[in-house]
Image: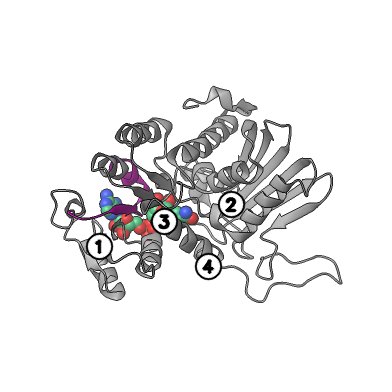
Amino acid sequence: MRIGLIGTGRIGTFHAAALARRPEVESLVVADVDAARAADLAARLGATAAPSVDALFPGGASGSGVDALVITAATSAHAQLIARGARAGLPVFCEKPIALDLPGTLAALTEVESAGTILQLGFQRRFDAGYAAARAAVRSGRLGRLHTVRATTSDPAPPPAAYLPLSGGLYRDCLVHDFDILRWVTGREVTEVYATGSDAGPAMFREAGDVDTAAVLLTLDDGTLATATATRCNGAGYDVRMELAGEADQIAVGLHARTPLTSAEPDGPGAPDKPWPGFLERFAPAYEAELAAFVDVVRGELANPCDGREALHALRIAEACELSRAERRVVRLAEIAGA
Ligand SMILES: NC(=O)c1ccc[n+]([C@@H]2O[C@H](COP(=O)([O-])OP(=O)(O)OC[C@H]3O[C@@H](n4cnc5c(N)ncnc54)[C@H](O)[C@@H]3O)[C@@H](O)[C@H]2O)c1
């Protein structure tokens, strides 16, 4: 199989290395608007660098014979690259998000659905062993009736200020992962949210109209209550967890020797020796597994594990949160377009 990868930045470098390790991937061609960056990565991996992004599409120098595309470029490029891939009849894996707004997301989905092509989105938590075990526990009935879910995502340090206006804000950029995995683990839909946020931390968040910390109360369609919190300012380390409590038992995803959490009890566990520093370390096996799954999807051996409609659902929850924060009220998902 010959795969073209577009965008050789932080996550693109990681995904390209994972693809290069797959025995089914006979040839990997990488491209970036920064051609030198693509050439550098290709040299390190023994891959091929395309002279331009255009070269990866049919008619382009490297396009003939590409069997699938992996899009890891900056978010602003996703929707048009997805559309070009669909028009070329190519299966596409794209990092989240499809676009930062609903019209852009729906337009890209229309392209994919009218072409009848595959679009897999990069919600890697679906491939994390802990979340998969939690999903199985919910489905098996082992927890009894699920009544409470507590999700959290905490980044160890704020991103560069220049990133904030391009990110879509904390709900669309960060909590969107919690919204996707909440739906996937519980198998339920969110019906309403109340979201609030704080910009009391670094001034760059206020200047960007964003928040550095957020809390969301979500109601699921079976009455289960969930909370999701996120912060960009968790000095203890990178902390992604989910607790699920039912009438019979409760479990936690992400409760691990590297969880950056210290017990306040005199006889409780102390600080971890090696707290998770970031998402690439915490989710390395999950990223690897989602790319392996994409290869299987392209080969026709696996159904798409996370299609564009799934990403749309998660974005709609994030949109509802932004509306809730702005208007300081409960927002029903039915109010958000794109259902
Ligand atoms: N699933 C996750 O956990 C996760 C984690 C990190 C990033 N991401 C997503 O991955 C994407 C990339 O993030 P990153 O952190 O690697 O960013 P980055 O800035 O490190 O890399 C982006 C790369 O895209 C290139 N680029 C920009 N526009 C392009 C275009 N039109 N065509 C080709 N290349 C282009 C840039 O030159 C750069 O090399 C973002 O959409 C982000 O939301 C997802």
Of 142 and 301, the residue lying toward us: 301
Among the two numbered marks 1 and 3 on one chain, the one whose residue lies closer to the N terminus: 1
> Residue 30, can we see it?
yes
Of discs 3 and 4, which sits in the foreground? 3
Which image quarter has ligand 1?
Answer: bottom left
Asked whether 117 falls inside the magenta stretch, the response is no
How far is disc 3 from disc 2 in space, using C-alphas?
A: 44 Å
Provide the secondary structure element on which disc 1 rests. strand
Q: Which residues are magenta?
A: 64-80
Q: Residue 24, how many percent across, how many down?
A: 35, 65
> Given the image, on which type of amino acid does mark 2 rest?
Gly
Contact between marks 2 and 4 (CB within 8 A): the answer is: no
Q: Secondary structure at mark 4?
A: helix
Q: Is residue 165 left or right of residue 266?
A: left
- The residues tagged by marks 3 and 4 sit, at their Cα atoms, a distance apart of 24 Å
Q: Which residue is mark 3?
A: 296
* Picture quadrant of residue 133: bottom right
Within 10 Å of the Cα at label 1, are there few (<14), some (14-19), or many (20+) other Cα atoms? Answer: many
Q: Residue at x 72, y 56 (%)?
A: 252
Residue 78's spot in the image, x, y percent? 34, 45
